[in-house]
Image: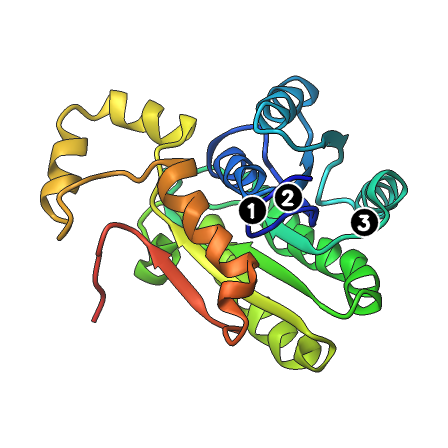
Amino acid sequence: MTRGRLAERVAVVTGAGQGVGRGIALALAAEGARIAVVDVNVETAQQTVDACRARGVDAVAVTADVGRREEVAAATDEVMQRFGSIAILVNNAHDFALGIPLEQTSDDDMERSWRTATLGTLYFMQACFVPMRDRGGGKILNIGSGGALDGDAGAASYVAAKEAVRALTRVAAREWGPHGIHVNTLCPFARTPRWEAFAAEHPGRVERQAAALPLRRAPGDPELDIGRAAVFLVSDDSSYVTGQTLFVEGGRMRT
């Protein structure tokens, strides 16, 4: 039998083909969870599945556009048919563009970000509510952003969607707590393909970011830093934590 804090629990992780989603999926797999990797990219999703299986757990790739309710419903049905239950949901998928001044932000920019992050989170929470309620509870982890609290320049569509995700987290925590469903937000600072591309275009940025943090290290590792924090929030170790936001950013502080 697989051992670990999440042994035999079924976890759905969206946008898990790369970056933060992949790191969280691997960290959950290392603790024994069975993983449903939800992504629009079949190839990267399968790569994450293979990596999860290498950690000794069952995993499956599920293709879905999280911004389409019917695809979310179909994906959830597929997971239920494969595993029979859903104990953990991690809403990470988000399609967005950065570097767009506020005055140039278009309806398409806002819709793209809103549909994948905010509506995608809503759709998956709704789809997983009954399976979690029927099993007596569950853990939902929504991925936010510290940059959304800071109001990062050139990121209007991104920060608006991410803060809406945090708002949904708080509502769900209040409404679903009586059913034993915990809902929290994690805001990571992690080394992702998008971040690496940005860093390559801005030499010295890594060193400046690291120097500004108390831990003097930037950014975090998607599995070892972000994923382990996620494990805490979806395991029994956080049994008295819900409706909260955890910042995993190397000690970055806000006033």
Residue shown at 71% from the left, 56% from the top: 87
Q: CB of mark 1 within 8 Å of CB of mark 2?
A: yes
Residue 33's label in the rendered image is 2
Q: In terms of depth relative to the viewer, which is nearer, 224 or 166? A: 224
What is the spatial separation of the Cα atoms under label 3 and label 2, in whole angstroms? 26 Å
Residue 241 in picture, x, y percent from top left: 50, 73
Q: State which tag comes first along the sequence, 3 or 2.
A: 2
Q: State which tag comes first along the sequence, 1 or 2.
A: 1
Residue 154 in picture, x, y percent from top left: 35, 45
Q: Quadrant of residue 63?
A: top right
Residue on which disc 3 sits: 69
Residue shown at 54% from the left, 71% from the top: 239
SS class of the residue under badge 1?
A: loop
Kind of residue sitting beneath label 2: Ala
What is the spatial separation of the Cα atoms under label 3 and label 1, in whole angstroms? 33 Å
Neighbourhood count class around disc 1 (C-alpha, 10 Å): few under 14, some 14–19, many 20 upward: few
SS class of the residue under badge 3?
A: helix
What is the spatial separation of the Cα atoms under label 1 and label 2, in whole angstroms? 8 Å
Point out the image quarter for the C terminus.
bottom left
216 above or below 130? Answer: above
185 above or below 85? Answer: below
Q: CB of mark 3 within 8 Å of CB of mark 1?
A: no
Kind of residue sitting beneath label 3: Arg
Point out the image quarter for the N terminus.
top right
